[in-house]
Amino acid sequence: MRDPAVLLHVNGVEATYQNAIVALHNVNLTVQRGEVHALLGANGAGKSSTLKAISNLLVLERGQVTAGTIRFDGHDVARTTPAQLVRLGLVQVLEGRRCFPNLSIEANLVTGALGRSASRAETAVDLERVYAIFPRLKARRRVAAGLTSGGEQQMAAIGRALMSRPRLLVLDEPSMGLAPLVVQDIFARLRQLNREDGLSILVAEQNSTVALQYADRATVLEAGVTVLNDTAKALRQREDIQHFYFGRDVAHQAPALA
Ligand SMILES: Nc1ncnc2c1ncn2[C@@H]1O[C@H](COP(=O)(O)OP(=O)(O)O)[C@@H](O)[C@H]1O
Ligand SMILES: [Mg+2]
Protein backbone atom coordinates (compact mmCIF):
# COMPACT_ATOMS: atom_id res chain seq x y z
CA MET A 1 0.00 0.00 0.00
CA ARG A 2 1.18 3.50 -0.81
CA ASP A 3 1.29 5.95 2.07
CA PRO A 4 0.57 9.45 0.69
CA ALA A 5 2.64 11.03 3.50
CA VAL A 6 5.76 9.28 2.21
CA LEU A 7 7.73 11.17 -0.44
CA LEU A 8 10.74 8.88 -0.74
CA HIS A 9 10.93 5.25 0.26
CA VAL A 10 14.18 3.28 0.12
CA ASN A 11 13.61 -0.33 1.01
CA GLY A 12 16.27 -3.00 1.53
CA VAL A 13 18.68 -1.49 -0.98
CA GLU A 14 21.90 -3.25 -1.85
CA ALA A 15 24.31 -1.65 -4.33
CA THR A 16 27.63 -2.57 -5.88
CA TYR A 17 30.34 -0.89 -7.96
CA GLN A 18 31.91 -2.73 -10.89
CA ASN A 19 29.86 -5.83 -10.03
CA ALA A 20 32.30 -6.46 -7.21
CA ILE A 21 32.48 -3.88 -4.45
CA VAL A 22 29.38 -4.02 -2.26
CA ALA A 23 28.88 -0.46 -1.01
CA LEU A 24 25.34 -0.79 0.34
CA HIS A 25 24.11 -3.95 2.07
CA ASN A 26 20.72 -3.04 3.43
CA VAL A 27 19.64 0.58 3.34
CA ASN A 28 16.21 1.56 4.58
CA LEU A 29 15.15 5.18 4.58
CA THR A 30 11.85 7.03 4.46
CA VAL A 31 11.43 10.75 3.86
CA GLN A 32 8.01 12.09 4.80
CA ARG A 33 6.54 15.02 2.90
CA GLY A 34 7.53 18.31 4.50
CA GLU A 35 10.36 17.06 6.68
CA VAL A 36 14.08 17.67 6.93
CA HIS A 37 15.70 14.25 7.06
CA ALA A 38 19.38 13.72 7.87
CA LEU A 39 21.34 10.75 6.52
CA LEU A 40 24.24 10.28 8.93
CA GLY A 41 27.31 8.08 9.05
CA ALA A 42 31.09 8.06 9.11
CA ASN A 43 33.25 8.45 6.02
CA GLY A 44 32.66 5.43 3.78
CA ALA A 45 29.36 4.43 5.45
CA GLY A 46 27.50 4.71 2.14
CA LYS A 47 25.81 8.12 2.30
CA SER A 48 26.87 9.30 -1.16
CA SER A 49 26.15 5.90 -2.70
CA THR A 50 22.66 6.01 -1.23
CA LEU A 51 22.04 9.50 -2.64
CA LYS A 52 23.32 8.45 -6.07
CA ALA A 53 21.06 5.40 -5.98
CA ILE A 54 18.11 7.66 -5.17
CA SER A 55 18.80 9.82 -8.25
CA ASN A 56 19.56 6.77 -10.42
CA LEU A 57 23.12 8.04 -10.94
CA LEU A 58 25.14 4.99 -9.86
CA VAL A 59 25.55 3.85 -13.45
CA LEU A 60 27.83 6.85 -14.07
CA GLU A 61 30.33 5.24 -11.70
CA ARG A 62 29.80 1.71 -12.94
CA GLY A 63 27.56 0.99 -10.00
CA GLN A 64 24.10 -0.51 -9.73
CA VAL A 65 21.33 -1.34 -7.29
CA THR A 66 21.33 -5.13 -6.95
CA ALA A 67 18.44 -5.59 -4.50
CA GLY A 68 15.61 -3.61 -2.94
CA THR A 69 13.42 -0.82 -4.22
CA ILE A 70 13.44 2.99 -4.32
CA ARG A 71 10.23 4.90 -4.88
CA PHE A 72 9.99 8.66 -5.24
CA ASP A 73 6.43 9.92 -4.95
CA GLY A 74 5.19 6.56 -6.22
CA HIS A 75 7.63 6.37 -9.16
CA ASP A 76 10.01 3.42 -9.38
CA VAL A 77 13.40 5.15 -9.54
CA ALA A 78 14.99 2.19 -11.35
CA ARG A 79 12.63 2.84 -14.28
CA THR A 80 13.05 6.62 -14.30
CA THR A 81 15.96 8.52 -15.85
CA PRO A 82 17.89 11.07 -13.77
CA ALA A 83 16.50 13.86 -15.97
CA GLN A 84 12.93 12.64 -15.46
CA LEU A 85 13.54 12.50 -11.72
CA VAL A 86 14.63 16.16 -11.76
CA ARG A 87 11.46 17.08 -13.65
CA LEU A 88 9.44 15.14 -11.06
CA GLY A 89 11.05 17.33 -8.39
CA LEU A 90 13.90 15.18 -7.08
CA VAL A 91 16.86 17.56 -7.30
CA GLN A 92 20.30 16.84 -5.94
CA VAL A 93 23.18 19.10 -4.94
CA LEU A 94 26.18 16.87 -5.48
CA GLU A 95 29.16 16.68 -3.15
CA GLY A 96 31.77 19.38 -3.71
CA ARG A 97 29.34 22.15 -4.78
CA ARG A 98 30.23 22.05 -8.47
CA CYS A 99 29.72 25.51 -9.94
CA PHE A 100 30.81 26.67 -13.38
CA PRO A 101 33.84 28.71 -12.24
CA ASN A 102 33.92 31.11 -15.20
CA LEU A 103 30.22 31.92 -15.11
CA SER A 104 28.88 34.61 -12.79
CA ILE A 105 26.93 33.56 -9.72
CA GLU A 106 23.73 34.66 -11.44
CA ALA A 107 24.50 32.72 -14.62
CA ASN A 108 25.18 29.65 -12.47
CA LEU A 109 21.78 30.07 -10.83
CA VAL A 110 20.02 30.47 -14.17
CA THR A 111 21.45 27.16 -15.43
CA GLY A 112 19.23 25.50 -12.81
CA ALA A 113 16.12 26.75 -14.60
CA LEU A 114 17.14 25.39 -18.02
CA GLY A 115 16.08 21.80 -17.40
CA ARG A 116 12.45 22.69 -16.92
CA SER A 117 12.42 25.28 -19.76
CA ALA A 118 11.18 28.05 -17.48
CA SER A 119 9.89 31.31 -18.95
CA ARG A 120 11.85 34.52 -18.35
CA ALA A 121 9.19 35.70 -15.91
CA GLU A 122 9.33 32.46 -13.91
CA THR A 123 13.11 32.57 -13.84
CA ALA A 124 13.04 36.16 -12.55
CA VAL A 125 10.62 35.24 -9.76
CA ASP A 126 12.68 32.21 -8.76
CA LEU A 127 15.91 34.25 -8.79
CA GLU A 128 14.38 36.77 -6.40
CA ARG A 129 13.39 33.94 -4.06
CA VAL A 130 16.95 32.57 -4.11
CA TYR A 131 18.32 36.06 -3.42
CA ALA A 132 15.85 36.51 -0.55
CA ILE A 133 17.12 33.28 1.02
CA PHE A 134 20.80 34.00 0.28
CA PRO A 135 21.41 37.79 0.28
CA ARG A 136 25.15 37.05 -0.12
CA LEU A 137 24.43 35.71 -3.60
CA LYS A 138 22.63 38.88 -4.60
CA ALA A 139 25.63 40.94 -3.48
CA ARG A 140 27.92 38.67 -5.50
CA ARG A 141 25.63 38.09 -8.49
CA ARG A 142 28.04 39.47 -11.11
CA VAL A 143 31.19 37.82 -9.75
CA ALA A 144 32.61 34.70 -11.43
CA ALA A 145 31.73 31.74 -9.18
CA GLY A 146 35.36 30.61 -9.19
CA LEU A 147 36.34 33.84 -7.43
CA THR A 148 33.83 33.48 -4.59
CA SER A 149 34.31 31.76 -1.23
CA GLY A 150 33.52 28.11 -0.52
CA GLY A 151 30.41 29.13 1.41
CA GLU A 152 29.18 31.31 -1.46
CA GLN A 153 29.76 28.47 -3.91
CA GLN A 154 27.77 26.11 -1.71
CA MET A 155 24.95 28.67 -1.56
CA ALA A 156 25.11 29.02 -5.36
CA ALA A 157 24.91 25.23 -5.78
CA ILE A 158 21.85 25.14 -3.51
CA GLY A 159 20.37 28.17 -5.28
CA ARG A 160 20.84 26.52 -8.67
CA ALA A 161 19.01 23.43 -7.38
CA LEU A 162 16.18 25.66 -6.12
CA MET A 163 15.85 27.14 -9.61
CA SER A 164 14.62 23.74 -10.83
CA ARG A 165 11.75 23.96 -8.33
CA PRO A 166 12.44 20.83 -6.29
CA ARG A 167 9.92 19.03 -4.16
CA LEU A 168 12.69 17.00 -2.52
CA LEU A 169 16.03 18.76 -2.26
CA VAL A 170 18.88 16.27 -1.73
CA LEU A 171 22.26 17.51 -0.47
CA ASP A 172 25.52 15.64 -0.05
CA GLU A 173 27.64 17.00 2.83
CA PRO A 174 26.92 20.71 2.42
CA SER A 175 29.12 21.42 5.47
CA MET A 176 32.27 19.96 3.95
CA GLY A 177 35.28 22.28 4.16
CA LEU A 178 33.27 25.24 5.45
CA ALA A 179 33.77 27.28 8.63
CA PRO A 180 31.32 26.50 11.47
CA LEU A 181 29.48 29.83 11.20
CA VAL A 182 28.96 29.38 7.46
CA VAL A 183 27.67 25.85 8.07
CA GLN A 184 25.19 27.16 10.65
CA ASP A 185 24.02 29.82 8.21
CA ILE A 186 23.48 27.32 5.40
CA PHE A 187 21.53 24.92 7.60
CA ALA A 188 19.43 27.80 8.94
CA ARG A 189 18.57 28.80 5.34
CA LEU A 190 17.63 25.21 4.51
CA ARG A 191 15.38 25.18 7.57
CA GLN A 192 13.81 28.43 6.42
CA LEU A 193 13.07 26.97 2.97
CA ASN A 194 11.50 23.96 4.66
CA ARG A 195 9.32 26.08 6.97
CA GLU A 196 8.28 28.79 4.51
CA ASP A 197 8.00 26.84 1.26
CA GLY A 198 7.24 23.38 2.65
CA LEU A 199 10.29 22.04 0.84
CA SER A 200 11.24 18.47 1.85
CA ILE A 201 14.97 18.01 2.37
CA LEU A 202 17.25 14.98 2.58
CA VAL A 203 20.75 15.91 3.70
CA ALA A 204 23.71 13.53 4.05
CA GLU A 205 26.20 14.65 6.68
CA GLN A 206 29.18 13.41 8.63
CA ASN A 207 28.66 16.44 10.85
CA SER A 208 25.88 14.88 12.91
CA THR A 209 25.85 17.66 15.49
CA VAL A 210 24.73 20.36 13.09
CA ALA A 211 22.49 18.04 11.06
CA LEU A 212 20.62 16.82 14.16
CA GLN A 213 20.21 20.41 15.28
CA TYR A 214 18.16 21.24 12.16
CA ALA A 215 16.59 17.92 11.10
CA ASP A 216 13.22 16.47 12.08
CA ARG A 217 14.32 12.86 11.74
CA ALA A 218 17.49 10.99 10.86
CA THR A 219 18.74 7.68 9.53
CA VAL A 220 22.17 6.40 10.54
CA LEU A 221 24.25 4.23 8.20
CA GLU A 222 27.13 2.07 9.22
CA ALA A 223 29.10 0.10 6.62
CA GLY A 224 26.23 0.21 4.14
CA VAL A 225 23.52 -0.82 6.60
CA THR A 226 20.78 1.28 8.20
CA VAL A 227 21.39 0.85 11.92
CA LEU A 228 19.17 3.59 13.39
CA ASN A 229 16.16 5.60 12.40
CA ASP A 230 14.58 8.01 14.84
CA THR A 231 13.56 11.58 15.52
CA ALA A 232 16.45 14.05 15.61
CA LYS A 233 15.39 14.95 19.14
CA ALA A 234 15.75 11.36 20.35
CA LEU A 235 19.11 11.01 18.58
CA ARG A 236 20.43 14.28 20.03
CA GLN A 237 19.85 12.88 23.50
CA ARG A 238 21.93 9.76 22.82
CA GLU A 239 25.54 10.69 23.38
CA ASP A 240 26.71 7.25 22.31
CA ILE A 241 25.64 7.97 18.72
CA GLN A 242 28.46 10.38 18.16
CA HIS A 243 30.92 8.06 19.83
CA PHE A 244 29.96 4.85 18.08
CA TYR A 245 29.05 5.97 14.61
CA PHE A 246 30.98 9.12 13.77
CA GLY A 247 33.99 9.44 16.01
CA ARG A 248 37.46 8.08 15.61
CA ASP A 249 36.12 4.91 17.24
CA VAL A 250 34.05 3.94 14.23
CA ALA A 251 36.48 1.17 13.39
CA HIS A 252 35.45 -0.61 16.58
CA GLN A 253 32.48 -2.91 16.70
CA ALA A 254 29.23 -1.01 17.17
CA PRO A 255 27.14 -1.99 20.19
CA ALA A 256 24.07 -4.17 19.86
CA LEU A 257 21.02 -1.98 19.34
CA ALA A 258 18.71 -1.76 22.30
N1 LIG B 1 32.91 5.01 -7.58
C1 LIG B 1 33.19 4.05 -6.69
N2 LIG B 1 33.79 2.90 -7.06
C2 LIG B 1 34.05 1.93 -6.16
N3 LIG B 1 33.75 2.00 -4.85
C3 LIG B 1 33.16 3.12 -4.42
C4 LIG B 1 32.83 4.20 -5.30
N4 LIG B 1 32.26 5.18 -4.57
C5 LIG B 1 32.20 4.73 -3.30
N5 LIG B 1 32.74 3.49 -3.20
C6 LIG B 1 32.83 2.69 -1.96
O1 LIG B 1 31.55 2.54 -1.41
C7 LIG B 1 31.57 2.67 0.01
C8 LIG B 1 30.66 3.78 0.44
O2 LIG B 1 31.19 5.01 -0.01
P1 LIG B 1 30.34 6.35 -0.02
O3 LIG B 1 28.98 6.06 -0.48
O4 LIG B 1 31.13 7.37 -0.76
O5 LIG B 1 30.31 6.70 1.55
P2 LIG B 1 30.13 8.10 2.31
O6 LIG B 1 29.49 9.05 1.36
O7 LIG B 1 29.27 7.77 3.49
O8 LIG B 1 31.49 8.54 2.73
C9 LIG B 1 33.04 2.89 0.39
O9 LIG B 1 33.59 1.65 0.75
C10 LIG B 1 33.64 3.41 -0.89
O10 LIG B 1 35.00 3.05 -0.98
MG1 LIG C 1 30.07 10.94 0.75
Image: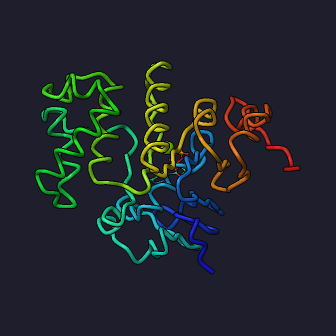
In the drawing, does residue 200 fall left or right of residue 232? Answer: left
Q: Horizontal and vertical percent for residue 215?
A: 59, 41
The image quadrant where one finds the N terminus is: bottom right
In the drawing, does residue 196 fall left or right of residue 222? Answer: left
Tell me where residue 63 sits by quadrant: bottom left
The mark tally for this picture is 0
In the drawing, does residue 220 fall left or right of residue 138? Answer: right
Above/below status of 247 relative to 160: above
Q: Horizontal and vertical percent for residue 3?
A: 61, 72
Residue positioned most to the bottom: 1
- Give the residue displayed 10% in from the left and 51% down from the top: 120
In the drawing, does residue 119 fall left or right of residue 55? Answer: left
Q: Nearer the viewer, residue 148 or 184?
A: 184
- Give the residue displayed 42% in from the left and 47% down from the top: 197
Tell me where residue 143 sits by quadrant: top left
- Give the residue displayed 20% in from the left and 22% down from the top: 147
Above/below status of 128 relative to 223: above
Q: Nearer the viewer, residue 16 or 221?
A: 221
Above/below status of 124 relative to 166: above
Q: Nearer the viewer, residue 88 or 43?
A: 88
Q: Horizontal and vertical percent for residue 149?
A: 30, 21
The structure's colour scheme is: rainbow
Q: Horizontal and vertical percent for residue 144?
A: 15, 28
Above/below status of 100 relative to 23: above
- Give the residue displayed 62% in from the left and 43% down from the top: 41
